[in-house]
């Protein structure tokens, strides 16, 4: 996600725009930029890093301008550099544009524009938009924007200004939020209301496919096809703090609920339905190299290590390639054995975890192809990898990882599909898997509706000081992840265990004070898990089960059941983890813990 702010009115634009993007910094903060319309034309200034770096570049200089746009970036295409920062301008430096979203067909558009004589300066997908608008410009900026957007596939929230149209701003929305703020002799546009709330609480929320033409005293909204829209004006009553969390009490809860949308972003543009195969251009591996692969080593820490364990099950089952998953902190200090045709895969949300970075460097030192599965574009691990896949989960502010975990697992499913289809998976099998993949975001949405039900379960157990999480097969790593979530934010001692292993020790802990969370889905090991449940019940253990919708039998065997929909067996972790995230969240809140910044933890462990 990126932060977008536009202003057109009677006051000096620079302070309004900078204050506005600061309100949006939680949306993305790897680079920033501003464009002001001055008497001498467009003034554009950009910087890498947080907004305070942009302020440093701008200094105290007063730019006489009452009209401008500003942007704080969360890079998706093109590393966070000054050149790649927004705003982007056309070749005549007369049009400036800022964008939040992903242009799926930017490669095709870029090739077309290059054939039209456009010289590109950046690696971004966004730059194609401003050149396309220029190409379609025939004297009316809004018409040029509408005509350009008819050629675009993907998501966007954009704001556009031009030195050829003083006091006019054009905004358009498709898939990325955009709101118009209505002031007195001044108007605003932004990614969300927090950027304008100190100036006005009268807003118009743009809908997908709408284009707004905004002046200091007026505004008009049409569809991309130029059909006039009569919008509804809303009065916003939220506080600023609430807005940045979009009404959620914590960033973690917001990020849990973002998962349907972030999973759609992870999948976007990466599924070839006809061939039943995933498309992962960033791996930078030729098909021949992928065919020659003999072994994969995955290395990560914490939650990312858990997603790696899930990836092991997926990749081995679908491609029959051996996969081993290593704690990065262990891997880097033992003398690992590398064989030829081995690929090393580092998984890291932040892309800055010291142990994971060191493990990647160790692999590269041994001449092994090292890939990164990363969320933060342009992070150190991303830059030092030979290739990789960005998970497109957007900024994850809560220290406890949730949406990044499910996006990591989704990318690993795509990798497993790709490697499987290159070996044993038929087109039909690939298509079946992709069909299930496409249903996952809606199924996650369905499970999120159970938050209140899960909160009631949390009410029963939030005073307990020990938990055991059990799972088998591909859901064993989910048990580990559920236990980590609870540990991290509620400070309760929680252990994840393979369900059968309970008999080899942990069963000694079971009594009515040790709640046991069991992932008991209708899969080949269901009966075995039911035996484990019986063993727990025989010792007065209390059980919370994650079960498959329609399974009535389990309800008689346990104390609480949280049902999740049926899906492709290897995709079940994407669904079974959701109730565990919510359970941990509600228990932590009931225990009065600081959910977004738990004690002793950091969002990114950049030290050994
Ligand atoms: C997960 O909730 C924790 N914040 C922590 O275990 C985290 O997963 C680990 O530090 C790895 O971080 P990374 O994914 O940014 O490398």
Image (cartoon, helix red, strand yellow):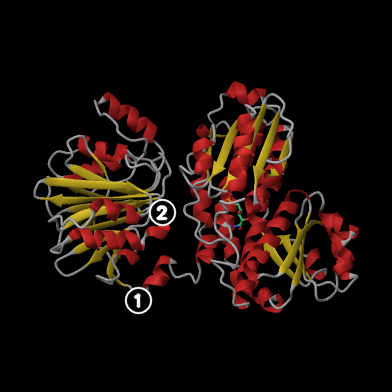
Identify the image quadrant of residue 233: bottom left
Where residue 24 appears, as percent x and y from the top left, is 36, 60
Q: Which mark is residue 237?
A: 1
Identify the image quadrant of residue 204: bottom left
Q: Is residue 580 visible?
A: yes
The answer to whether mark 2 is within 8 Å of ligand 1 is no
Work out which residue is located at the far top of the displayed protein and give it.
288
Where residue 372 appears, as percent x and y from the top left, is 56, 39
- Eyeballing the image, is 289 above or below 547? above
Q: Which residue is identified by label 2?
A: 28
Ligand 1 sits in quadrant: bottom right
Report helix, strand or loop for mark 2. Answer: loop
Where residue 296 appears, as percent x and y from the top left, is 68, 34
- Per the model, the C-alpha gap separating discs 1 and 2 is 25 Å
Residue 33 vs residue 62, the one in the foreground: 62
Circle 1 packing at 10 Å, graded few (<14), some (14-19), many (20+), is few
Residue 228 lies left or right of residue 312; in this view the side is: left
- Eyeballing the image, is 212 above or below 283? below
Where residue 275 appears, as percent x and y from the top left, is 57, 31
Q: Is residue 225 visible?
A: no
Circle 2 packing at 10 Å, graded few (<14), some (14-19), many (20+), is many
Q: Which mark is residue 558?
A: none
Q: Nearer the viewer, mark 1 or mark 2?
A: 2
Report helix, strand or loop for mark 1. Answer: loop
* Number of numbered discs: 2
| Residue visible at 64% across and 73% down in the picture | 587
């Amino acid at each position: 996600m990126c932060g977008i702010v536009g202003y057109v009115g009677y006051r000096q634009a620079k302070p309004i725009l900078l204050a506005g993007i600061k309100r949006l910094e939680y949306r993305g903060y790897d680079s920033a930029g501003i464009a002001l319309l001055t008497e001498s034309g467009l003034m554009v200034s950009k910087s890498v890093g947080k907004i305070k770096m942009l302020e440093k570049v701008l200094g105290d200089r007063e730019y006489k301008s009452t009209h401008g746009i500003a942007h704080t970036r969360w890079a998706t295409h093109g590393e966070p550099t000054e050149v790649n920062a927004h705003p982007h301008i056309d070749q005549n430096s007369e049009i400036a544009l800022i964008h939040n979203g992903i242009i799926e067909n930017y490669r095709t558009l870029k090739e077309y524009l290059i054939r039209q004589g456009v010289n590109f300066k950046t690696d971004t997908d966004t730059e194609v938009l401003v050149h396309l608008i220029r190409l379609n410009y025939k004297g009316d900026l809004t018409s040029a924007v509408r005509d350009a957007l008819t050629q675009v596939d993907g998501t966007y929230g954009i704001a556009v200004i031009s030195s050829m149209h003083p006091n006019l701003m054009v905004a358009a929305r498709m898939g990325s939020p955009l709101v118009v703020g209505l002031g007195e002799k001044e108007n605003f546009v932004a990614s969300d209301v927090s950027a304008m709330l100190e100036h006005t609480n009268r807003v118009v929320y743009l809908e997908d496919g709408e284009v707004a033409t905004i002046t200091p005293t007026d505004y008009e909204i049409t569809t991309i096809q130029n059909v006039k829209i009569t919008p509804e004006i809303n009065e916003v009553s939220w506080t600023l703090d609430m807005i940045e969390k979009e009404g959620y009490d914590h960033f973690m809860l917001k990020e849990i609920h973002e998962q349907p949308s972030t999973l759609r972003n992870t999948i976007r543009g990466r599924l070839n339905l006809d061939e039943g195969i995933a498309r992962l251009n960033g791996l930078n591996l030729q098909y021949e190299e992928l065919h020659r692969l003999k072994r994969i080593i995955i290395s990560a820490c914490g939650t990312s290590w858990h997603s790696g364990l899930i990836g092991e099950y997926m990749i081995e089952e679908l491609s029959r390639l051996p996969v081993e998953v290593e704690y990065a902190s262990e891997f880097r200090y033992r003398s690992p054995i590398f064989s030829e045709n081995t690929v090393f895969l580092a998984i890291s949300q932040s892309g800055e975890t010291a142990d994971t970075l060191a493990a990647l460097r160790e692999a590269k030192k041994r001449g092994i192809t090292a890939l990164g599965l990363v969320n933060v574009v342009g992070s150190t691990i991303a830059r030092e990898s030979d290739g990789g896949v960005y998970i497109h989960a957007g900024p994850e502010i809560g220290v406890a990882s949730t949406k990044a975990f499910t996006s990591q697992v989704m990318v690993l499913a795509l990798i497993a599909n790709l490697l499987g289809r290159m070996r044993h998976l038929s087109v039909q099998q690939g298509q079946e898997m992709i069909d299930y993949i496409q249903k996952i975001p809606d199924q996650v949405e369905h499970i999120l509706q159970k938050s209140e039900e899960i909160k009631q379960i949390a009410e029963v157990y939030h005073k307990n000081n020990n938990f055991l999480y059990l799972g088998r097969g591909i859901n064993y790593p989910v048990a580990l992840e559920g236990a980590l979530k609870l540990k991290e934010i509620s400070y309760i001692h929680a252990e994840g265990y393979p369900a059968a292993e309970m008999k080899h020790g942990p069963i000694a802990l079971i009594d009515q004070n040790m709640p046991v969370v069991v992932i008991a889905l209708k899969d080949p090991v269901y009966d075995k898990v039911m035996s484990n449940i019986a063993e727990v019940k025989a010792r007065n253990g209390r059980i919370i089960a994650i079960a498959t919708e329609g399974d009535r039998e389990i309800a008689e065997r346990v104390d609480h059941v949280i049902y999740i929909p049926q899906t492709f067996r290897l995709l079940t972790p994407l669904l079974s983890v959701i109730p565990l995230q919510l359970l941990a969240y509600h228990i932590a809140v009931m225990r009065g813990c600081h959910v977004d910044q738990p004690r002793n933890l950091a969002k990114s462990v950049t030290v050994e």
